[in-house]
Image: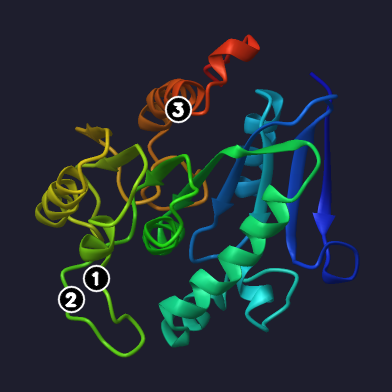
Amino acid sequence: MKVHERVLTPERDGIYGYLAAPERDQPGPALLMTHQNTGLTDYQKIEALKFAQLGYTVVVPDLYSMLGYPDVTHIHTGRQIQARTKDGEFVRVIRQGWDYLTSRDDVDSTRVAVSGYCMGGRIAIHFVAATPEVRAFVGYYPTVRDEPTTEIRPVHPCDAALNIKCPSIILYGVDDRISTVPIQQRVWESFLANGQPLEWHFFPFGGHGFVDPGTEGYHPHAAKLSWPLVVDFMARELDHEADGLTFSEN
């Protein structure tokens, strides 16, 4: 399958970000990816290309640039931007990315999923809870902590998860030192309570960021196991099996 990729700019597209899309004649399934706290990195682009090769139009909004902090990289500044940005502002710019993706001619707006990694997983919980049009949610180790609500974080992700109206797949590792196992248990209970189909994958290895080679918690075996699980979930929930989907374990 031939795939094209390009940087998204406000001048041409109305948003900052990255696009990876297969060439096709009819509208098809799509994925909105929300990045981790280090911003839109090369790893996120590689993940987007992998999904595009499976037939998904993928958009990764550059959330920090859309919030008013444009830069070549946010690897060293992302944590500080995250710390002073309200969840509502993150949801607002994710919505801009969603609107861009779902308005594209190559996208079937009824077959769009959202995925989130690390910080992006936490924020995506809030976005998905507020957006019933989302068809499926993929949460890679959402950064959830046992902490009180604040003006910047007025709703705990576990409370927001109660309002999600679509199937979800959530993946965590036992060695996660940010969202520890007791917190993962609370997240699990919240997703169960929303009454939607849930696939929960708990690996007996892997830390926070276990699918990303650029993180301290990277675990190649957990990453390899995760990929076909997510691909299978996406295909079923976005009716992509009928499109003749196949996948690689790479």
Are the two marked residues, 3 and 2, in contact with CB atoms closer than 8 angstroms?
Answer: no
Mark 3, secondary structure of its residue = helix
Question: Which residue reaches farthest right?
Answer: 12
Instruction: Name the quadrant containing residue 195.
Output: top left
| Numbered disc in front, either 2 or 1 | 1
Locate residue 54 relative to residue 156 in the image: left or right: right
Spot occupied by residue 194 in the image (x, y as percentages of width and height): 21, 48
Residue 61 seen from this side: no
State how the image is colored: rainbow
Spot occupied by residue 208 in the image (x, y as percentages of width and height): 33, 51
The residue that mark 2 highlights is 147
Neighbor class of circle 3 (other Cα within 10 Å; few <14, some 14-19, many 20+) is some
| Three-letter amino acid code of the residue under disc 2 | Glu
Q: Quadrant of the N terminus?
A: top right
| Three-letter amino acid code of the residue under disc 1 | His
CA separation, marks 3 and 2? 32 Å
Q: Is 40 above or below relative to 206?
A: below
Q: Which residue is at a point 18% across and 76% down the rendered structure image?
A: 147
CA separation, marks 2 and 1? 8 Å
